[in-house]
Amino acid sequence: MIIVLKQRAPADQVQKFCAELKGMGFEINDSVGSDTHILGLIGDTKALSESWVLANPVVDTCRRVSEPYKKANRKFHPDDTVVEVGGKVKIGGGNFAVMAGPCSVECEEQITLVARRVQAAGASILRGGAFKPRTSPYSFQGLRAEGLELLDHARSQTGQPIVTELMNNEHIPLFLDKKVDMIQIGARNMQNFELLKAVGRTNVPVLLKRGLSSTLEEFVMSAEYIMAEGNPNVVLCERGIRTFETSMRNTLDISAVPMLKKMTHLPVVIDPSHAAGIAFMVPSLAKAAVAVGADGLMIEVHNDPARAKSDGAQSLTPDQFDDLMSTIRPELEFFGKTLN
Ligand code: PEP
Ligand code: MN
């Protein structure tokens, strides 16, 4: 961190500030110019808050020169992390995984039918929401615990691992009891720090979705929360961000993939369904996701989109999902990715 001191800052106060920083374990590279006095802090500054530094009356400005995230940082972990889900599906490091299923689990027939169809098409993880974050309290809120039972049942039929959203710390024992293979933290909870810490204390892989208007650094800092508690199995999911564009639900930030891969060693997947909000765009965005180097996809598939209890407009039918998989298979081969 570089700290620029105020011109004519009283020497005794500067000395006191430097002593305080040294007491915190930093070495100081002290550079006094004709009219600027700069302190270069040497040491691990991740726990040093900029606002604490700026609050000192001798400080004019300060700037971080190293990232505030360590465990997720590619600099300290150059190799790609490979996250294993359900003991068999690999995501990252050349392994590409497709998670597919309905937005919400609605009933046994629906989830088992969709599970069979997406598995036959080549998806390796079944998605389905049991606890649903809905904009309106009057919209379908999910089958909750019963939804988890139905996912568990679908898994017993196909053997496919399941991923489902956790919205509340209190539900963690239920998720562990049902042996949920991957816990999804939804966009709206990306900065629910208590929830992030709680999943960080489990060893269940986490699918962390990017907040609707979060910067990539904020996104990676949320992954850091999970990792700092001891859970290294984090997969980042870009699911579209809010922009000035209104013709689709969100704007897929395709640039996030190469940038996140530069910043971190974690796998990055794309959810084109929530990004677009309209089914016809999903296959094109899925192809773009493969081309830009994503490690996987999350796709909403419903047996009868017109009657879906949530997100029908963006859901593919099983036949449309078959077509999507047929298009991306040769593309994955071209880019040297292994479909898990
Ligand atoms: C979902 O996956 O159904 C969902 C609610 O996603 P997001 O948190 O990205 O909106
Ligand atoms: Mn959805």
Image: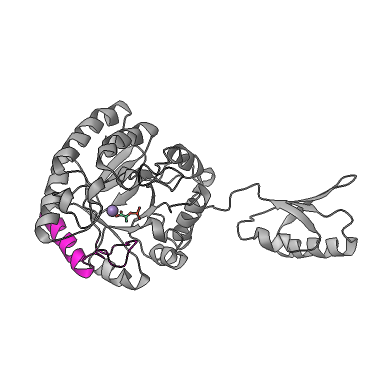
336 with respect to 113 (left or right): right
Q: Tag count in the figure?
A: 0
* Residue at the (38%, 35%) spot, across then down: 293
* Residue at the (17%, 38%) spot, across then down: 320
Which residue occupies the extreme top position in the image?
334
Residue 190 falls inside the magenta stretch = no
Which residue occupies the extreme front position in the image?
246
Q: Position of residue 244 (x, y in %)?
A: 46, 44
Q: Position of residue 325 (x, y in %)?
A: 21, 36
Q: Quadrant of the C terminus?
A: top left
Is residue 286 positioned above or below 250 on the image? above
Q: How is the image coloured?
A: one colour
296 with respect to 253 (left or right): left
Q: Position of residue 239 (x, y in %)?
A: 37, 47
Residue 87 vs residue 215, the one in the foreground: 215
* Residue at the (22%, 54%) spot, across then down: 161
Name the quadrant where ligand 1 sits. bottom left
Whether residue 1 is visible here, answered yes or no, is: no
Which residue occupies the extreme bottom position in the image?
170
219 with respect to 272 (left or right): right
Is residue 27 positioned above or below 258 on the image? below
Residue 167 vs residue 41, the one in the foreground: 167
Whether residue 305 is visible here, answered yes or no, is: yes
Asked which quadrant contains residue 180, the reply is bottom left
Is residue 96 positioned above or below 60 on the image? above
Residue range of the region highlighted in magenta in the rendering: 130-157
Residue 153 vs residue 249, the one in the foreground: 249
Is residue 30 positioned above or below 17 on the image? above
Q: Position of residue 291 (x, y in %)?
A: 35, 31
Residue 156 falls inside the magenta stretch = yes
